[in-house]
Image (cartoon, grey):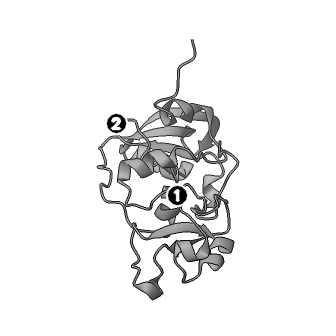
Amino acid sequence: MAGSFRTSFVREPNSLRHNPALVLNADYRPLSYYPLSLWTWQDAIKAAWLDRVQIIAEYDEVVHSPSTEIRIPSVVVLKDYVQPQKKVAFTRFNLFLRDEFKCQYCGARGDLTFDHVIPRARGGVTSWENVVAACSRCNLRKGAKSLSQAGLSLRKAPRQPVAEELRNQGRKFPPNHLHETWLDFLYWDAELQA
């Protein structure tokens, strides 16, 4: 669906491009889906060495110290459960994730900004219920007008999402790279092949 779609909102350090480790909570679910919870191979080895994680799967590649050879972890699970956040922060990224990285007026992707449904000039507030993702073209067209004055309509009414909704929304946007050892841990509701 959106496998090739990549936004500039998720910055990927260079160190995550080579042998990243998928990080699972103690319940074997990723800490987050979007951005996918990944550690550098160095951080994964350090956490394993400090006995904070259990290594579930490994890459074929190895690293060497003067006295040890270690296969690079590809999946690690935390030994202590990390409680997921219940309250969703009102951030630009979370707003775009809620709106599936689409303009809520025309459905376009890319070049997104945000728009106040009821303009601030008319008393609108900056809140989950009044701000939507919008492409630059629609945002300029609407300006400080009401939806009816601008001839626009919303694809869906804006509302505050719950944390579980955003986690599920994030599952729709897999990263460009998915190692085969990660797949069993990423799609809990995938239909099994007979």
Task: Please tell me in which quadrant of the rendered image residue 71 appears.
Answer: top right
Q: Amino acid at mark 2?
A: Asp
Judged left or right of residue 125, residue 105 is: right
| Residue 90 horizontal/vertical position (percent) | 40, 68
Mark pair 1, 2: CA separation: 28 Å
Which quadrant would the C terminus be assigned to in this image? top right
| Residue 128, horizontal then vertical, whole percent | 40, 67
The residue drawn where x is 61% and y is 32% is 180
Residue that appears at 51% across and 52% down: 34
Q: Earlier in the sequence, mark 1 or mark 2?
A: 2
- Secondary structure under tag 2 reads loop
How many dots with numbers?
Answer: 2
- At label 1, counting other C-alpha atoms closer than 10 Å, the crowd grade (few under 14, some 14-19, many 20 or more) is many
Q: Quadrant of the N terminus?
A: top right
Say above or below: 99 vs 176.
below
- Front-most of 96 and 40? 96
167 sits left or right of 141 in the view: left
| Residue corresponding to mark 1 | 99
Horizontal and vertical percent for residue 74?
55, 39
Depth check, mark 1 against mark 2: the one in front is: 1
The answer to whether 76 is drawn above or below residue 130 in the figure is above
Please provide percent x and percent y for residue 122. Answer: 44, 85
Q: Which amino acid type is shown beneath numbered disc 1?
A: Asp
Residue sitting farthest toward the top: 194
What residue sits right under mark 2 in the picture?
27
Give 27 or 79, whichever is nearer the viewer. Answer: 27
